[in-house]
Structure formats: C-alpha cells, structure tokens
Amino acid sequence: MSKKLLVVDDHMVIRLGLRSMLEGTDLTITEEASNAAETLAAVEKSVPDVILMDIRMEGGDGLNTLGRLKLDHPDLPIVLYSAYDNPTYIARAVALGAAGYVLKSAPRDRLIEALQTAAAGESAWTREELRRVTGALATPRLSQDIDVPLTHRESEVLRQMAQGLTNKEIAKMLGISYETVKEHVQHILRKIGVTDRTQAAVWAVRQNLV
C-alpha cells in the first residue's frame, strides 16, 4: 500500500528531483510545500504518512516547523533533509523528535530506506548520527530545570547558535563584532555549564528558547 508523503523544500528543482527519485517505490508525494506556513496548512488539510522537510528555507526554519508540528501531531514521522552536516542541527532534530536526518548528498537508497522506516513508525536515525550527539543529549546539566541568568544579548546569541549559525554569521545577523560574539559564546557555555555549541543548542531547545 502506498504511503502518502509531504515534501517541504523551497527549491522547486529539489521537489521535482524527489518525484523522479521516488518513482517506482511505495512512497507517493501527495503534497508539496515551500515554507512553514504552507507546511502547517497542508498537514491541517490532510495528515500525511511521513514528511520530508528541508531545514534552511525562506519563510521559516525547518527545525522550528518540526517543533510546531510535533505539538499537535506527536506521532507524525518527520525526516529532515538538509545539505548541512551540522551537529547542532542533528542534536536539535533528535531533541525535537524527528524520525531521522538525511543529507541531500546521500544515495537514493539511503533516502528511500529512511522514509520507509519512518513511515512504518520506526526510527530512521543511524548509529553514527546518534553517537555524534549522545554526549550532548545526556549531559546532566541539560536535564535539570535551572534558572540561568543570561543577558538579553546572550539570549539572542544563544538563539542564533541553536539555529546552527557560525560566530561570523551571528556577528553579521546582530550587527556586532566577531570578537564580541566569541565572548558571548564563552559566557553562555560557562553559565549553562556545558562544553560545546551542540550541548548549548539542546539546552536552548529544552528551555523553549528556539
């Protein structure tokens, strides 16, 4: 029996390519969306069996959309599809309940297997992906409800870190110097009690900052 698939990507060439890649499989693209609003509307109209969703899109971050969808549809399998092999993205995806994470450079077989596994209600995460973020997700400090006195600017920097932006990108986004961003990042890690950006991103997710 064919599985209904919603594809979310802001590039039409990617969506067209996916239709070609999935021909002859038991996965049928019944809906397409190019941003967060279209995605939420499509799911409201008809809940698919599985969603394949890009992360960096015009008109809404895919990880934020994942979080919003999971609030109303906790059992809906959502696989992230990204060009970025970013541990922060992967950690946030795990923390938010994604069914898997596939790189756009991955072979066709990997994509199909991940979607079929997710549609069957199983985890499509590989051991390697989970191994990379296990330390971040298991850090004791992250499971404690601790009030951390971040300044307004530190909170802004943390949100951008959790979006997967580099220090250079954060500096440009907030209109501050690269060195100032580095100082804020060091203060944030020390205050939260973690050792790297991936752990900070997981903390931000669990504190509902992103």
Image: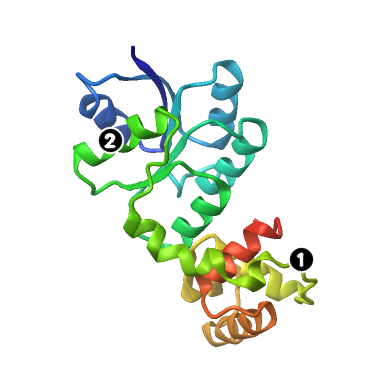
Q: In the picture, residue 115 is in which quadrant?
A: top left
Disc ID at residue 145: 1
Task: State the residue lying farthest toward the top.
Answer: 1
Residue at 49% x, 44% y is 98
Residue 64 placement (x, y as % from top left): 58, 47
Circle 1: element type = loop
* Residue at numbered disc 2: 113
- Looking at the picture, does residue 141 appear above or below residue 27? below
Residue 200 placement (x, y as % from top left): 58, 70
Circle 2: element type = helix
Foreground residue, 186 or 148?
A: 148
Total numbered badges shown on the rendered structure: 2
Residue at mark 1 to residue at mark 2: CA–CA distance: 37 Å
The colour style of the image is rainbow
Contact between marks 1 and 2 (CB within 8 A): the answer is: no
Q: Amino acid at mark 2?
A: Glu
Whether residue 172 is visible to the viewer of this picture, yes or no, is no
Q: Quadrant of the N terminus?
A: top left
Marks 1 and 2, the one that precedes in the sequence: 2
Residue 16 placement (x, y as % from top left): 28, 28
